[in-house]
Image: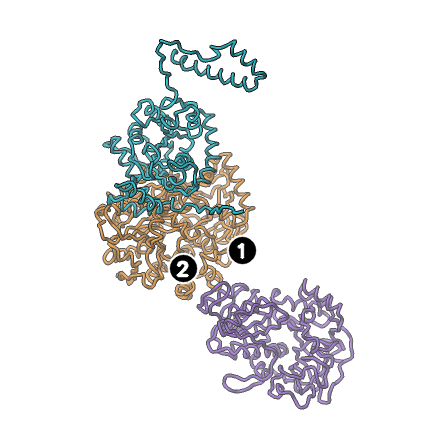
Chain colours: A purple, B cyan, C orange
Amino acid sequence: MKALRIERKPVRFAAAYVAGSVTPGKGATWGPLRLADVEGPTLPGRDWVRIRPRLAGICGSDLSTVDGHASRYFEPIVSFPFTPGHEVVADTDDGGRVVLEPVLGCVARNVVPVCAACARGDLGGCERLAFGDLSPGLQSGFCCDTGGGWSTAMVAHPSQLHAVPDDFSDEAAVMVEPTACALHGALRAAVRPCALVVVLGSGTLGLLTIAALRHVTAAGTIVAVAKHPEQRRWALALGADHVADPGQEARLVRRLSGSLAYGNQLTGGADSVIDCVGSEESLAQSLAMVRPRGTVTVVGMPASVRLNLTTLWHRETELRGAYAYGTEHLVDGTSRRTFDLAFELVRAADLGRLVSAHYPLRDHRQAIEHAATAGRRGAVKVVFDLRQEKERNR
Amino acid sequence: MSVDGERREPFELQAMRVAARAVEGVGTARSRVRTVRARTGFPWTAPTAPRGVEVQAKKGRTGADFETEWARTPVARAGRALLVEGPMRAMVSMAADPERVGQDRLADLRSARHPGPVIFAANHHSHVDAPLMITSIPEPWRHKLVVAGAADYFFTTRVTGALSALVLGAIPLDRSRVNRRSADLAASLINEGWSLLIFPEGGRSPDGWGQPFRGGAAFLSVRTGAPVVPVHLDGTGTILGKGMKRPKPGVTKVTFGTPLVPTADDDARTFAERIELAVTALADEATSDWWSARQRAAAGTSPPLTGPEGSSWRRAWALADHRARGKAGQRRRQQRAWPKLD
Amino acid sequence: MPRPGFVLDVDRSTPPILFWRGEGFSLEKLPAGRTRVIYPAEALPALKDVDGSIRDALLHPIDSDPLPALLFPGMKLTIAFDDVSLPLPKMRRPDIRQRVIEAVLDLAADAGVDDVHLIAALALHRRMTEAELRHAVGDRVYDAFAPRGLLYNHDAEDPDGMTVLGQTPQGEDVVMNSRAAESDLLVYVNINLVAMDGGWKSTATGLTNYQSLRHHHNVATMRASRSFMDQHRSELHSSNWRMGAVIKANGPRVFQIETTLNNDTFPKPFEFLAKREWEWTGRDRGLFLGASKALNRFPARRARELFAGIESPHQMTSVQAGEVEAVHRVTTEHVYRQQLVAVEGQTDIVTLGIPYICPYNVNSIMNPILVMCTGLGYFFNMYRGKPLVREGGVLIMTHPTPWEFHPVHHPSYIDFFEQVLADTTDPLEIEAKYEKSFAEDEWYRHLYRTSYAYHGVHPFYMWYWGSHALQHLGRVIVVGGDPRAVRRLGFHPASTMDDAFEIASDVVGRHPTITHLHTPPLLMADVS
């Protein structure tokens, strides 16, 4: 079968780091990613099944891996060589369509008894990530035993699979996983009714977060920060009330929150800031814009940053992360799986619209470059289309 | 002709004497000089007067009759301009650190198509006053300016007279009596377009308080029609006041007042009073502020320049108070010099 | 004898015409046969004895007792004066305001008046700095009054500082600075640079607050002011005059002193900027070439500093004092005498060179909103009768329009540009949707009161100022402007004058008639 694989080659990673720093996405040409004809993964356990991806998305974390920018923190919780791709809609052998929930928790790893987090349904918080029957790997797509979506075939545990309703297009279905991430982030932010919320970043994650905020929280005013005109239009379409150019958001938040300022620091500010970028600048900006005792939720994946945390101390700001998904406890007291909510949101907000480009595996370099420069080129989500691959139907 | 001849002859003699002295300086043998002198005598030396003739008093060439016209030639003016803008300005700013205000009151005189001559009338405390004024008077008057100097002070010897005329542009003014010649000279210079700086008090203050104004400035203004600009100088008395041997650097303030023009019913005396009142009001303005000074002037309660009446110690006592309010009270603190004990 | 203004018909021998471009200028060749250039009149002769004329005006006022008769011991006297927005560029010292104020205070001192306050009547403009106040009133007055807190900037947001004087029959609130309102006599010292200034606008606008201003600083009023430079056809002025009646009835006695200036705008050696191009000497041409080349090389900041240093040799052509309306009638005559130029008929296009300065960026930056206000607000409205450009015509202006704002002076402008104009450029929509929130923003209020910022609502007024033009014009083109900023204003950017005519051709056809307003110096077109 055909698969894009990443191998452990330090020189390649270094080359990717250099190339990716010069031109985003160029890591695909110089880095460790290779299109290869490989043996399909063997089933690692009794319950496991083989699935054949139809569409597989290119996610921000994939890009940072390909460009060699991912934090070394991940080293112990990935296993080489792996095939990336965790936003997957696939065919099962029995003819059904499924969406993959890629987190590899205790159940998939055959850890008995399951850890406390998995017992609660908080899959993202699983405490046995690198243990059990599988090689280390936080998600399918980072583990050498499971394969990943950027190939014609992979394996999955039935607990990871969600059946796709018939009225869902493949494009809508492939958006379910990132939507679940965004939903989790929006809910982690614990937005109070009528709150002023700022979303930094208008990539896929930022836009989906805006949609999630609009649908599952009672946020009052949502401010998006968008660099490119296409992003600006999407942000407004998905529920943002105001869109600011980068660098202008602090002034907008000042005016909307009616606060004063000293230096760059607002005296008041937004009730909640959701950082879908995760860079040093965006985190510093978040802390400067959030009101005292407000919350900064980091949804975009950060690496090492230098940050002045005096305001965190002085203004008692909460800085919290939001990773993956699991089970959400809603305001009305009910608990729902994030993926179930995500299916609803994708349908309600018609998020399949956000898939803007399809590429076959052989054009993976163009695909990754496109994804890395999506905002500038007016795209949102770029996916690999595997439906036409010959090997798939062998 | 004869008068001219008379005047020139002694000068030639003097030149000869200088030449002779020069010869003496470079002269080789003393004895040789002596022989030369012995051989020559008069006319190489001054004649002795025969006894029994009445020796006529020499025609005065100093005092009010000192000739200063040469100091107004273009060459001398250019030289003076260089002196004023260079060393004089530097020395004034070092010794007196002046703050100059009120020049805007001269804007109309200046913006006239052909700015005419002006009489600047200032109070007088110190030898710093003249250089301070010369460097403060704005263009276009600064470099076409003569200064009325006391004939009996600046022009007593040829050297001081020449220096005063060259450096300050001084002209001799007789302050002890009305002197047609010095008044005519000043008036004709004004008519030729020269501005005049005059200190109507007639001399530096002997005790730090002002003296009554004399009529000279007013008289010249009435006669020539040139406007009088009253000026107040504050703080110069403590820099090089009368009786001080060495200058003590300090802080000063020059306040220009609104130009005064004699009206149809002004004579020199009433106009002089107005000038004195104007300087009095400026003095008040310099030590308080314009509005308070203006209110007091309107009410006729401006503190007089001449200080309180009464015994001399009370005047001295009040002077300290008066100086403390003005710029002299802000004398630059000098570093205390402890005697070296080693 | 100064020559009056005139209208030049451009032919093939006409040299290229001077266009201002912010801190710079260019020469543009205008099409022959269908273009006319309106030149301002040369500077009228100045009054010979300025101080004497001022004193004479105070002693022999129009429709009023002489000033000394209005002054008595124990009275409360307030002197209000125009702020840093007048005159433009700032005039050489001594400023006229200083001369008038000193003359008034002289009389007040003679009358034994003790309680005097001086107030810079700046309404919602930024506060004047010490240096600016010193320039306006002179060091003597500043040093006498400011340290004791008797000379200060008007504060429209002082909760205890404003007094409601009543309402006009139309329900317009009349509010005035309390000190002024409670005075026995309010003396207003005005500089009438353009026909819009002066009259009741001095007191009713200069000393009031947002509550009162909103009745005439709004889109409906500005659209009904055709133009706001012509007080008889200006709703802005009608409203101010109605408020004046309330001040007359319930407010302090007002003694208005108005002055007019001549056209002598540029100091040596830059007088050529006001000359007619075919009269430029070799020296003028050399200076133009040198200056425009050098300015292109200069960093913007240096160029701004250079221009901010210009002190214009403006001279006073008249001074009159007394009853507000009577005085203003005379003043307006004098302004017209200098500025009015008779022009016949309208054209398809009007072209304007926008200079480096307008009333709201003294010692500051000409930001895009001010470019709009100068072109579509001030210059467009410099007409009496009909606008120079026909309805549906095109306005072309030259200015670099950088996306740049003075962070201290114009904080609310930044937000207006980034947030409001990004949403809409329609004045009515802007007024309805955003005005209140900006006017009541506590941060802007704080900066207005304690820093040197224009009030939060001020950028809205700038936009309203151009609302009549926005309604009248078919298209606005900015030559040489930053395209992003120009588009944000809702205008069309063009790189050269030829491009601009090309862009205009969709609206006015291939052979449009063109008028160029050769200003500054200021002129007002009397269009028949």
Relative to B339, residue A62 above or below? below
Task: Name the one closer to the observer, B25 or A211.
Answer: B25
Residue A152 location in percent, x, y? 73, 78
Furthest toward the bottom, the residue is A113
Residue drawn at the location 62% of the way across and 76% of the way down = A171
Residue designated by label 1 = C483
Residue designated by label 2 = C450
Which chain is disc 1 placed on?
A: C
Task: Name the one closer to the observer, C228 or C158.
Answer: C158
Residue C170 location in percent, x, y? 28, 62
Relative to C107, residue B181 above or below? above
Q: Is residue B186 visible?
A: yes
Precedes in sequence: disc 2 or disc 1: 2
For marks 2 and 1, give the CA distance.
35 Å
Residue drawn at the location 42% of the way across and 11% of the way down = B48
Q: Quadrant of the N terminus of chain C?
A: top left
> Quadrant of residue C49 in the image?
top left
Residue A166 location in percent, x, y? 62, 83
Does residue B235 appear to the left or right of B266 in the view shown?
right
Pointer 1: residues within 10 angstroms few (<14), some, or many (20+)?
many
Does residue C82 appear to the left or right of B92 in the view shown?
left
Indicate the amino acid at tag 2: Thr
Which of pointers 2 and 1 indicates the residue nearer the eye?
2
Q: Is residue A387 visible?
A: no
Pointer 2: residues within 10 angstroms few (<14), some, or many (20+)?
few
Q: Secondary structure at mark 2?
A: helix
Residue drawn at the location 73% of the way across and 78% of the way down = A79
Indicate the amino acid at tag 1: Pro
Task: Name the one closer to the observer, A149 or C439.
Answer: C439
Relative to C485, residue A191 above or below? below
